[in-house]
Amino acid sequence: MIESNDLSKQFNNEFWAVDGVNLNVQPGQILALLGQNGAGKTTTVRMLTALLSPTRGWARVGGYDVVKHPQEVRANVGVLTEQHGLYMRMTGEEYLDFFGKVYGLDAKTRKSRSDYLLDYFGLKEAARQRSGEYSKGMKQKLALARALIHDPAVLLLDEPTSAMDPESAQLVRNEISRLRSSSRTIIICTHNLAEAEALSDQIAIIYRGKILLNGTLEELKRTVLGPVEYEAKFAHEFDAGEFELPSGAELTSRSATSLRFRVEAPQDVNPKLVNALTSRNAPLVSFQEVPKKLEHVYLKTMADAQGVTYAA
Amino acid sequence: MRRNWNAIWMVAQREFQDQFRDWRIIVPMFIMVALFPFIADNSTRQAINFMNRFGGDLILDRIIPFVVLVIGFFPLSFTLIVALESFVGEKERGTIEPLLSSPLDDRHLYLGKLLVGVSTPLLFSYGSVGLYLLLLSRRDVEFPSAYMMTLILSLTFAHAVLMVSSAIVISVQATTIRAANLLASFVVVPVAFLLQGETVLIFWGDEGVLFYAVVGLTILSGLLIRLGLSHFKREYLLGREIDTLNFKSIGRTFLARVTGNAKSIFEWYRVEIPATLRQLRQPLLIVISVAVLTIAAAYLWVVIYVPTYIEITPERVQESQKYLSANIGNLDFLSENVPAPWLFFSNVRATILFLFAGLISFATLAVTLFMVNMALVGVVLGGASLIHFSPVMVFAVAILPHGLFELTAVTIATAAVLKVGAVLVTPQPDKSMGEVFILSLADWFRVFIGLVVPLLAIAAMIEVYLTPVIIKMAFPYL
């Protein structure tokens, strides 16, 4: 579990890299931390790993306070850093064995964990090769294996699938999903919005050290982009003319072959809306939600924060 | 203890493995070890032949220890490369963060890396010396004594620790190997001077002094290790992203510390200076104790040992007293020969020298210089006692009038330097090493400008204009 309250970090007594971050990530949940470069994601992660001490506020990771019990925090956290940080003259096997030792695993556990991870990430063949000879994706996988070597309760992953080919990225996403289902608490810092959308239970958008938004994807969409929109598509040109909309629905746009509505409570309003259209003999082909992506939420939030107009 | 050692060894083991797989380190080291003893052996042979032709037995005796020192030192130049690579290199390549994110303690990481930084070059260094001695054994030359060899090998060891621990201190400050290499000249240049000094000691042939050099270097290395330990902090290692010097910020911090919260000079003297003196209570106590003990030791040494070198006969005592009596009139011209401003600037310069000596030695050299000065007082009093003058009277008449100000000033200045040294090697969790350095320097400056300089000015005036008058008046009663 990860909790933080007013977590803040100031550098050189002047610059607040992180300012008042509140987080609550339960076991079995994934939080995606999104933001521009330099927004404060890495500093937040470093505070949660007890690498930097907060200037203000507190954080508890895996039940341990990051200031009072830094070693316990670090022992319970698996970290994938921004740079993979591999020792290029060590083989994959040696590297995992070294970090296994660092985390206090006995030789038998080290061997079994290392074998499992190398096998899972498809690095078994290259296990005795120096990591300097690995491809970018292989390096990233080995770094992720390092973060998982001690089977930590909490995972802090910075760009876990960057530099990976689609198959490897999928493999990593599957492993992250598996870890979530085994009650791990996970934070992912990423610029890959599709990945964040696919994996996360919670999304937080950070800008200049402050969390602008935090919630589920649905909550974020509703907050930023407003109520859900639905689109009715017709088989051919259809003039709906002026017709009475059920309360809770609002016509937002129309074309010759489609109508768009903003609906407050779809479960109540949508049946009435479909009914109204069919009663006017509309050649209805489909009636479905207009997809809104996390990308729209993110870009709109950023545009609002910077005071510029967001053009979807 | 065992757990600590295991963690240190774990870090060291990985570093060893990494080093021995890096041909850029190993190949030059092997070449140096394999080649240099042969070159040195050949040079020694030619030097010996030359000496035998023209005579120079003394130099001949000392040349082998000197060559051993030099041969031992060459592979040590790699300590800097190894240490910088191990610390800044890891930072630059981003490999340090996963390591820092692990449950390893800061000191485990530091000591593990220190162990590797020292031992690999030292291994090659001793290997090189061994090979040279092996080559030398084929020649008809006298080997240095076992004691001398122990001293030289200890010096080599101390050099290694000194260079690695300094390199680590540099590494903590730098974020790139390039920057660290530039800063490394701050290590290379003093060590080169040190080597020259040790060479002089070897040729001088005083093993006793050489022993004290080994002790001094070991203490200095220990202090540097402590300095590195106190500043090798995760927070600081990751907190710095770029190497920049913000002179404006440095100046602001320094000035703010010097002036404190005082709004006027009177408030500064009324509030800030007493507060600084309160902070100096402990170092002052140490420095005063050192002064008393040194004066007493020097006094006793003169009183006890000088008569064993020079026979103190009644005639000799009388002769000395007569000489002093005849020359007492020279004191009238003291202000012409030693003008007060010259004396003042000379003393100010000396206290600044204390600071610089203290900065490069974490106050040990400053305290040593202070002890030398105090020993002079003891020697003067001891000498007075030998010629049957009352040491108490001599102190009261010839030293106390200006000494009250001068000794106080020097004592405060030394205590301030001692505090700077102590602060530098003490962990300061929320401050960087640069901040600690600037603040300590500001603390010293506050004492220096607020107390030491005015006291030395008064002391110089008294010493030139008042002390001679008092001495002349009191001389018949001494």
Image (cartoon, coloured by chain):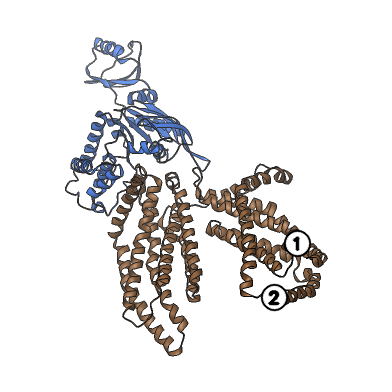
Colour brown maps to chain = B
Q: Quadrant location of residue B151? A: bottom left
Q: Chain of mark 1?
A: B
Q: Which residue is mark 1?
A: B393
3D distance between C-alphas at marks 1 and 2: 22 Å
The amino acid type of the residue labelled 1 equals Met
Is residue B467 toward the left or the right of residue B375 in the image? right
The residue type indicated by label 2 comes to Thr
Q: Residue drawn 41% across and 39% down?
A: A43
Q: Colour of chain A?
A: blue
Q: Nearer the viewer, residue B378 or B107?
A: B378
Residue A22 % position (x, y)? 42, 29
Q: From where the camera sits, is residue B13 visible? A: yes
Q: Residue furthest right?
A: B473
- Provide residue B347's location: percent of width, then percent of height: 68, 62
Q: Secondary structure at mark 1?
A: helix
Q: Nearer the viewer, residue B404 or B428?
A: B404
Q: Give above or below for B305 relative to B420.
A: below
User: Against B93, is B312 above or below?
Assistant: below
- Residue that numbered label 2 is attached to: B313
Instruction: Classify residue B16 by image quadrant.
Output: bottom left
Of A291 and A64, the residue lying toward us:
A64
The lab-note entry on whether marks 1 and 2 share a chain reads: yes
Q: Position of residue B366 (x, y in %)?
A: 58, 59
